[in-house]
Image: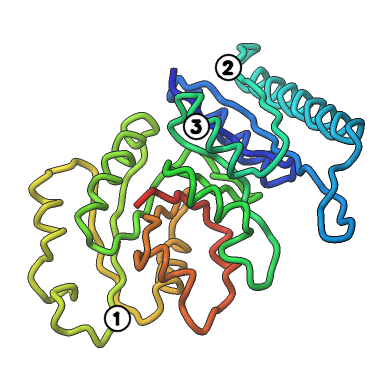
Amino acid sequence: MKTILVLTDFSPSAQKAAEEATIIGEKLNAAVILLNAYLIATIGVSTEPMPWPMEYYHMLEQDSIDMLQLEKERLQQKMSSCNNGQAGVNLFTISRGGNLADSVSEIIKEKDVQMIFMGSRHNKGSEFLFGSDIKEVINIARLPVFIIPETGLNLPLKEIVFATDLYTTDLNNLEFIVGLATELKFIIELCHVTPHDHCNDGLRKDHPPSDFQLKLEKANIPGVSFTILNGDHIREELIRFTDKKENVILALTHKKHSFFWRIFHETPANDLMRINIVPLLILPG
């Protein structure tokens, strides 16, 4: 059976991510696993870290198990009220001690995980994206990762905007999005942002189509449109573009020098949190 893995720290955004995962899981006939990875601390004594007493670990583990059970019951109650008493998706819980990314990697190997849901972080400062946990999960998972803000997806989803750097490898990720669109009934809009001063790269609206566009046309995928945005700041253009839409997800491929890379490494680093209002789908590169 298909499986959606939900990473939860029981925060409001993580709870919203879990809710959206159960709704989508039901439509995709997928099971949902709730994972809580609790931190195992050490005590710094001289130069060697020392473990906490064993009863401390048991307490952390039990707290995690108890919180997962409460979250599972909350989601089951929510599903039941929305489905006229029906149970909805199969919900499972896993509690693991240690590093979150390591736990995710282990579960991906153990289970048939197709996608991951997690809540966005709200910490400001120099952290890449919205928190180091998200960065680590994206790097290690090599699966589609949905990052859900506290406002949720506002289902039913109407559109996914897939920002592409025009590498043909993005066509592989487009297949995943098209598969979702078939089940969830939303439209797909590919877009590319090109700077105003790029006059000879074939990306402006008045230039011939790129190799990517030609291959996209040849693929003849129904329900997919393509838009070229002219602007010097990728992040700001995408925010402006998605701000005009309702019930939308912004999809990006995570590979070095891709849209994803450039958006979160542009200088000067303007307010990264502005993009946090839009749910993100980060695809493997």
* 215 displayed left or right of 15: left
Q: Name the residue under label 2.
A: 90
Q: Residue 195 carries which label?
A: 1
Q: Mark 3 points at which residue?
A: 108
Q: Position of residue 30 (x, y in %)?
A: 47, 22
Q: Residue 17 carries which label?
A: none
**SS state under label 3:** helix
**SS state under label 2:** loop
The quadrant where residue 68 appears: top right
Residue at 79% x, 32% y is: 64
Tell me if residue 1 comes above or below residue 229 in the rendering. Answer: above
* 17 displayed left or right of 74: left
- Residue type at mark 1 is Pro
Which residue is most to the bottom? 197
- Residue type at mark 2 is Asn
In what quadrant of the picture does the N terminus appear?
top left
Near mark 1 (Cα within 10 A), the count class, few <14, some 14-19 or many ≥20, is some
Q: Front-most of 1 and 179?
A: 1
- The disc, 1 or 3, on the residue closer to the chain's N-terminal end is 3
Measure how far apart labels 1 and 3 are at the Cα level: 39 Å
